[in-house]
Amino acid sequence: MELHATRTIAADRATVWAALNDAETLKACIPGCEELTGSPEEGFSAVVKQKVGPVKATFKGEVTLSDIVPETSYTISGEGKGGVAGFAKGGAEVTLSDAEGGGTDLHYDVDAKVGGKIAQLGSRLIDSFARKMADQFFENFQAQVEGTDDDQDAETA
């Protein structure tokens, strides 16, 4: 499954870059993420609960960053194992650039693969799920960075 998209975020590149490298921000943005620990230098460990069609699974995995060009781009790669449900692995090339009229364009190219029981669900369902997860992550990320997330407001109240 491949996905290519761009989002314009109302923040400068330094702010967006810092958020892309912050474990707490990433944890808040990953749908179903229960735990995310680590650092950009050492890599991250994650626990994510998800339901793909009729299959519910808890994925445990590792995420690493490579090809890092500060405030410009990096490649994020990861693999999660969900026991009998199967596995998911993939990566994304993330690039930041100055947006016309201010803000930052965040461009991403995602490539993901699944195996095991999940892979038997069919490519249409898998692609739809992966697209929804990526869109949700970047929507959450944009809300976190721009400070428009309702959950964030509730926590500070």
Image (spheres, helix red, strand yellow):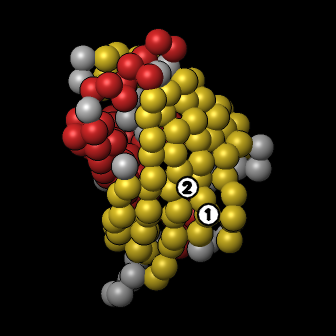
Of 77 and 152, which appears nearest the observer? 77
- In the picture, the quarter occupied by the C terminus is top left
Q: Is residue 136 left or right of residue 116?
A: left
Residue 71 horizontal/vertical position (percent): 61, 71
**Left-right relation of 10 to 72:** left
Residue 129 quadrant: top left
Q: What residue type is disc 1 on?
A: Tyr
In this view, 109 is above or below 63? below
Query: What element does badge 1 sit on?
Result: strand
In the picture of the structure, the residue carrying the numbered disc 2 is 20
> Which amino acid lies under the numbered mark 2 shown in the image of this protein?
Leu
Disc 1 to disc 2, C-alpha distance: 10 Å
Q: At which x and y percent is residue 57?
A: 41, 17
Q: Residue at x 48, y 79 (%)?
A: 97
Instruction: Describe the element under mark 2 as helix, strand or loop.
Output: helix
Residue 10 seen from this side:
no
Instruction: Estimate the x, y position of residue 34 in percent, counting from the top left.
Output: 49, 24
Residue assigned mark 1: 74
Crowdedness near tag 2: few (<14), some (14–19) or many (≥20) residues, C-alpha within 10 Å: some
In x, y percent, where is residue 112?
Answer: 45, 46
| Residue contact at pointers 1 and 2, CB within 8 angstroms | yes
